[in-house]
Amino acid sequence: MFESWDYDPDAVPVRSGHFIGGSIVDDRPAIEVRRPSDGVVYAAIPEAGEESVDRAVASARKAFHDSDWACIEPRRRARILRRWADLLERHADELAVLESLGSTRPVADARAWDVPFAAESLRFFAEYADKLGGDVAATRGDHLGFVASEPYGVVAAIAPWNLPLVMAAWKCGPALAAGNAVVLKPSELTPFSSLRFAELAIEAGMPPGILNVVNGSGARTGDSLVRHADIGKITFTGSTRSGAAVMTAAAATGLKPVTLELGGKCPQIVFADAPSIERAAAIVSRAILLNAGQVCVAGSRLLVQESIRDELVARIIAHCRMPVPGATWEKRAILPPIVSQRQAIRIDGIVNTSLAEGAEALLGGDWESAASHYRPTVLGGVTNATTAVREEIFGPVLTVQSFNDEEEAWALAAHGTYGLAAGIHTGDVSRALRAVRKLEAGTVWVNRYGRSEDFVIPTGGFKSSGIGKDLGRQAVEANLRHKSVLIDFS
Ligand code: NAD
């Protein structure tokens, strides 16, 4: 089938509702859902209020206590997670259509990358199911002390719209591998692939109720979920502002532990001794064009050594001219649409404010209002005070600043708010290691940018970019609590 795509977006059936107790349950449609590519309303979702959220949490709680999910041999749990991953791949064509239809992900990317990546990350988490049981403590000879790692119970997982399936896998995978039950709330902008994701979990043998999905807005459904008394832990990915609201609600309703993966404003630093200027240009461009800049780790701030500035910027501009805007159901699409008109207007507002502040458009900056795509934009003449340098834009907008030496580079790279990721291009290993020490970022990439299947390396931010990690052993550990036991057998 895949070879024959493009597909007709009006011919794709979409199933709506919540997923509670092992099946999709209907509810009154309340929120219209639009296709980013053409703005057409193609479906609607219900909005779970306190009552529906309570049903989902009760279903998760019951399954956690009554099914054997938390206490079966961990390797059996791992087998179910691996079977689930296999099923995602077996249904990759169908999932790629569902994912691309209503999100910013071009169908070819969703098929080649998102679905296999989501599946492989579930396999990665499965590998930890029997590896994090706890520790035996050193105690006096007639005592036995141990620390038992146990699941929290019901984990609330809240995901953003920018990579819906991958984010769902990164939120649910570690919580489930650790033996928890989960209630997932996908973004109201991209709700549908998560329902199919959950159905396939049941087909893989996961007990009904262990994974539930509630649909609705953040303000109503997300907030009710976070505040629910039976939630043991919250794992959230989204904007820093919403993350702060989640943390406040979690603190007010029982001090629930939170993992927060939030916004970023990531620098890409290119020194004159980079192994290849052309390779650096390709990497820098890709890091801002991927998903049209709608990625938390978008490399949105180029810092370049003055002596190579003009050459590097010219090469980056050439790369930025290449992507062809297209609808996500066109196989040829390279530059994806912006998720919503509201977001495109926001991007344009930041660009225009920055131009008024003295920035110069080296490319783009001339959005035609109502267009669903935002042309890649490169802004020179900026400082750390320019709005486009300070604010997370979540669009294909790259700012350019130059420096003369390392100290200046580190000073420009430091951001007052965010510390998610950073890239550095240099042929000098000592300089790269100095960068690792200096840069306040949860991830530092050297002579590359972005991740591949290196799931063992966690992802997560410093400062207002978040608390805790997705991926890595750390993500599974964050879904376990530790019980200390001391036995006197004298
Ligand atoms: P968002 O904060 O608007 O929404 C994210 C999710 O949170 C959605 O499901 C939303 O409905 C829900 N939500 C919103 N307010 C809530 C509240 N008060 N209580 C509970 N839930 C609430 O973010 P978005 O626009 O969907 O995604 C883009 C943002 O996500 C960007 O800032 C991006 O940097 C960030 N992000 C971060 C990472 C990371 O790993 N650090 C990854 C992807 C996206």
Image (cartoon, grey):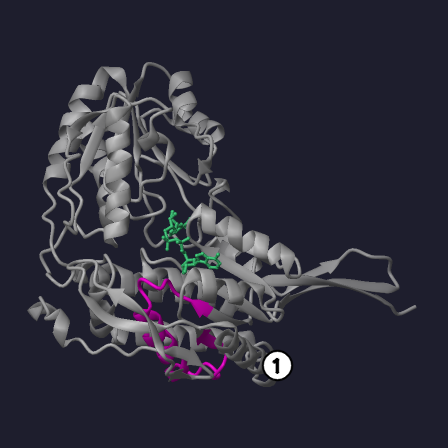
Give the residue at x 45% y 37%: 419
Residue interval drawn in magenta? 184-212
Residue 178: image quadrant is bottom right
Can you say whether 8 is above or below 163 in the image?
below
The residue at 18%/28% (across/down) is 361
Q: Is residue 392 visible?
A: yes
Task: Please indicate whether residue 359 sits to the left or right of residue 76 in the image.
Answer: left
Q: How many marks?
A: 1
Going by the numbered disc 1, the residue's amino acid type is His
Specify the quarter for ligand 1: bottom left
Instruction: Classify the position of the N terminus by image quarter.
Output: bottom left
Q: Local crowd at mark 1 within 10 Å, few (<14), some, or many (≥20)? A: some
Q: Position of residue 198 (x, y in %)?
A: 39, 76
Residue 377, image x, y percentages: 19, 35
Q: Nearer the viewer, residue 224 or 1?
A: 224
Q: Could you tell me residue 255's position as x and y percent?
A: 65, 57
Front residue (pair 467, 273):
467
Answer with the quarter of the image where residue 384 lies.
top left
Q: Is residue 190 magenta?
A: yes
In percent of width and height, residue 185 lies at 43, 67
Where on the picture, by quarter, is residue 256?
bottom right
Does residue 415 appear left or right of residue 299 in this picture? right
Taking the spot 8% from the left edge, 66% from the top edge, the residue there is 6
The residue wearing badge 1 is 65
Q: Residue furthest right?
A: 490
Residue 356 included in the magenta stretch of the image: no
Residue 128 visible at all: no
Find numbered disc 1 in the image and state the secondary structure of the residue it sits on: helix
453 vs 157, left or right, is left
Establish if 195 lies above or below 407. below
